[in-house]
């Protein structure tokens, strides 16, 4: 199955291909399995150290939630290597578009096992001439992060149907299927009630799609043996007790794994954004809190000594003398007690302070220089030209139905500090006790923009600005998502301004620095003590071209680029509707900001293209740049 996973390494720790995600391939949809199944155990100590990503600052932070964490392991590159991402087909139900036969993948395989052998997702009926099978589009997810198929073998056997308003098809929001829990036979709270018994002993299901009727009532599940048939009308109103399926853990003793679950599973389209949200944390490498004297190779040697059954402290002391390393450094590496919870804003403050106040390290892992632009760039106080930047991104877990904020990723859902209904699922079969986490390490370049603190304070005193922020916060309170409420709690005019400015410059840089918008990323530094943002590009996107950092070489040209970005923001094709908007986009969390003027690719934005308002920059009465 590894050969079917063709997306880049960066997507393996993202919402577009991380552990537990459902992705489309040319053959069929697959679910990415836990990284424990990828083969990292095949590495011996001599090989393992080559794939360890070193960022002690990030590891110390992650130990808040992963107390046994030792290594961040790089996503594999070679397709034929010892380590390869694994997956299994999901959804598990397939139908033949030619003959309409509809079966679980295990039943399709049985026909092939008794026929010509290897199953290749083709119909076994000779009349279908090798017709490629297709999967159903519908899955079920619950708040605890589980995912499962609908009980298709029972779909055409209903006791009662309650009419409901049909939702549109583009609604965005292996324990075997025979093992349906007995409690699902209890009266369902859904609008469709199933009996949870097959329609007849010799059931033979067919999945037929009408050419004339294109809505859900045109799709029929019919038994050829008894003739009982039902459409998919009302499918989005169906729910059932969750079976706790965890297909991403792969097979164990021939069965897909799961756990007890007391939540209701609801129907989603398999391509809906809401079926998967990767919980990732990223870190810019800085020398602070790094155990710089210990290479990855030395770390694996130390762990090998400590894990030996006959280990004694004197073994470490001998090793330290032989390698010329202070024993204190080894003890620092082995000390797992430094697990204080670090909020995202505090973690970023360390990066912000370092780039603004320190000199680049001698080893030149990163290369940067500060530029004082006060009085030279309107509205800005400083720039940091970063010629070489290292970013590490790690996926810790994922949720379904709703994302969670960065600070909640490292909070135990069982604690009183966790505020969400959705529960994160770990990317490891060892759950949060894992020793490893998958990560990617990218080198790139960027510019850190720092706005004029004094001007920001004066600008923020305008009452109209305060009212616009409150408007967005009110919309967030009305949202169904806790994520929106939490993100809006500490929302400020400064954050909306800086976030919107970041978007406008990313859109403008596409024309001048050689990178498309999708290859540029923002990183916001906003608090009472921070008023900046980083725009960066990395290898693994569209290269590491040098064209971004070079923009700092000529401040007059850079000022012209910024001026052009501000001017473009005054001319949206959807004005005056966009300009005068009191709420638009998801949950109405944007004001004067839309796809035509402000939004950027989701992969470039940290806040899901929310909390934007270009009027804060350009309005004649209260704009920052007026």
Image (tube, grey):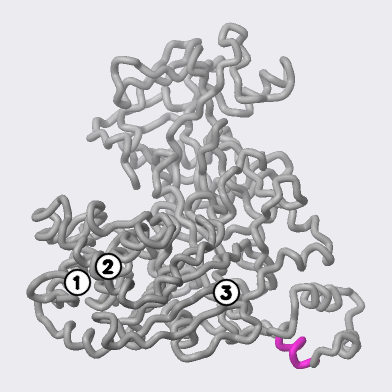
Is residue 205 in sight in this rendering? no
Q: Of the residues under marks 3 and 1, which one precedes in the sequence?
A: 3
Q: Position of residue 213 (x, y in %)?
A: 29, 18
Magenta residues, as a range?
327-332
Mark 3: few/some/many CA within 10 Å (<14, 14-19, 20+) = many
Q: Residue at x 40, y 31 (%)?
A: 194
Looking at this view, name the residue that lies furthest to the top: 127
Category of crowding for the residue at label 2, using alpha-carbon neighbours closer than 10 angstroms: few (below 14), some (14–19), many (at least 20): many
Depth check: give the residue in front, 524 or 331: 524
The answer to which of 415 and 124 lies nearer the viewer is 124
Q: Position of residue 139 (x, y in %)?
A: 45, 38
Most foreground residue, 123 or 394: 394
Question: Vertical placement of 159 versus 187: above or below?
Answer: above
First along the sequence among labels 1 and 2: 2
Which residue: 44% across, 83% down? 352
Residue highlighted by disc 2:
500
Q: Are marks 1 and 2 in contact (CB under 8 Å)?
A: yes
Q: Residue 330 colored magenta? A: yes
Q: Nearer the viewer, residue 260 or 257?
A: 257
Q: Nearer the viewer, mark 3 or mark 1?
A: 1
Q: CA distance from mark 3 to mark 1?
A: 37 Å
Per the image, the residue denoted by label 1 is 617
Residue 390 part of the magenta segment: no
**Relative to 66, 581 lies left or right:** left
Tell me the quadrant of the picture where the N terminus can be found: top right
| Residue at 83 percent of width and 66 percent of height | 45
Q: Position of residue 482 (x, y in %)?
A: 33, 63
In the picture of the structure, the residue carrying the numbered disc 3 is 62
């Amino acid at each position: 199955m590894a050969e079917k996973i063709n997306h880049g390494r960066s997507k393996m720790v993202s919402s577009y291909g991380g552990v537990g995600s459902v992705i489309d391939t040319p053959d069929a949809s697959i679910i990415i399995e836990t990284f424990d199944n990828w083969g990292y155990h095949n590495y011996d100590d001599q090989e393992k150290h080559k794939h360890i990503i070193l960022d002690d600052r990030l590891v110390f932070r992650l130990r808040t939630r992963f107390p046994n964490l030792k290594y961040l392991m790089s996503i594999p590159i070679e397709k034929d290597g010892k380590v390869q991402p694994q997956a299994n087909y999901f959804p598990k139900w397939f139908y033949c578009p030619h003959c309409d036969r509809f079966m679980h993948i295990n039943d399709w395989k049985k026909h092939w096992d008794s026929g010509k052998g290897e199953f290749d997702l083709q119909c076994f009926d000779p009349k279908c001439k090798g017709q490629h099978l297709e999967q159903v589009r519908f899955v079920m997810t619950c708040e605890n992060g589980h995912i499962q198929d609908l009980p298709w073998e029972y779909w055409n056997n209903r006791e009662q149907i309650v009419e409901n308003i049909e939702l549109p098809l583009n609604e965005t929001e292996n324990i075997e299927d025979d093992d349906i829990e007995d409690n699902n036979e209890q009266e369902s709270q859904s609008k469709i009630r199933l009996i949870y018994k097959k329609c007849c002993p010799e059931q033979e299901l067919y999945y037929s799609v009408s050419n004339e009727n294109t809505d859900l009532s045109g799709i029929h599940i019919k038994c050829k043996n008894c003739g009982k048939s039902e459409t998919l009308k009302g499918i989005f109103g169906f729910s059932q007790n969750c079976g706790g399926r965890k297909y991403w853990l792969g097979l164990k003793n021939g069965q897909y794994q799961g756990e007890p679950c007391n939540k209701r599973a609801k129907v989603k389209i398999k391509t809906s954004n809401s079926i998967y949200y990767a919980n990732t944390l990223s870190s810019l490498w800085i020398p602070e809190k790094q155990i710089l004297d210990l290479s990855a190779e030395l770390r694996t040697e130390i762990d090998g000594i400590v894990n030996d059954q006959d280990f004694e402290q004197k073994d470490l002391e001998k090793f330290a003398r032989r390698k010329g390393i202070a024993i204190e450094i080894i003890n620092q590496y082995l000390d797992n007690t430094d697990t204080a919870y670090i909020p995202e804003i505090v973690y970023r403050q360390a990066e912000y302070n370092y780039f603004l106040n320190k000199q680049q390290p001698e080893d030149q892992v990163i290369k940067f220089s500060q530029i004082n632009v006060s009085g030279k760039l309107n509205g800005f106080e400083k720039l940091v030209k970063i010629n070489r930047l290292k970013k590490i991104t790690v996926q810790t877990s994922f949720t379904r139905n709703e994302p969670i904020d960065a600070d909640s990723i490292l909070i135990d859902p069982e604690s009183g500090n966790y505020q969400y209904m959705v529960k994160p699922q770990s990317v490891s079969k060892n759950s949060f006790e894992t020793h490893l986490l998958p990560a990617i390490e990218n080198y790139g370049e960027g510019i850190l923009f720092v706005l004029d603190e004094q001007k920001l304070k004066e600008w923020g005193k305008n009452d109209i600005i305060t009212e616009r922020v409150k408007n967005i916060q009110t919309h967030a309170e009305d949202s169904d998502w806790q994520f929106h409420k939490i993100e809006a709690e500490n929302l400020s005019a400064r954050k909306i301004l800086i976030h919107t400015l970041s978007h406008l410059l990313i859109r403008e840089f596409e024309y001048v620095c050689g990178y498309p918008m999708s290859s540029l990323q923002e990183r916001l530094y906003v608090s009472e003590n921070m008023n900046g943002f980083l725009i960066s590009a990395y290898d693994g996107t569209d290269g590491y071209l040098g064209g971004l950092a070079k923009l700092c070489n000529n401040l007059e040209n850079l000022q012209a680029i910024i001026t052009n970005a501000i001017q473009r923001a005054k001319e949206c094709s959807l004005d005056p509707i966009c300009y005068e908007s009191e709420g638009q986009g998801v949950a109405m969390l944007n004001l004067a900001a839309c796809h035509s003027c402000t939004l950027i690719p989701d992969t470039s934005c940290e806040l899901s293209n929310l909390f934007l308002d270009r009027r804060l920059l350009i309005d004649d009465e209260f704009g920052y740049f007026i």
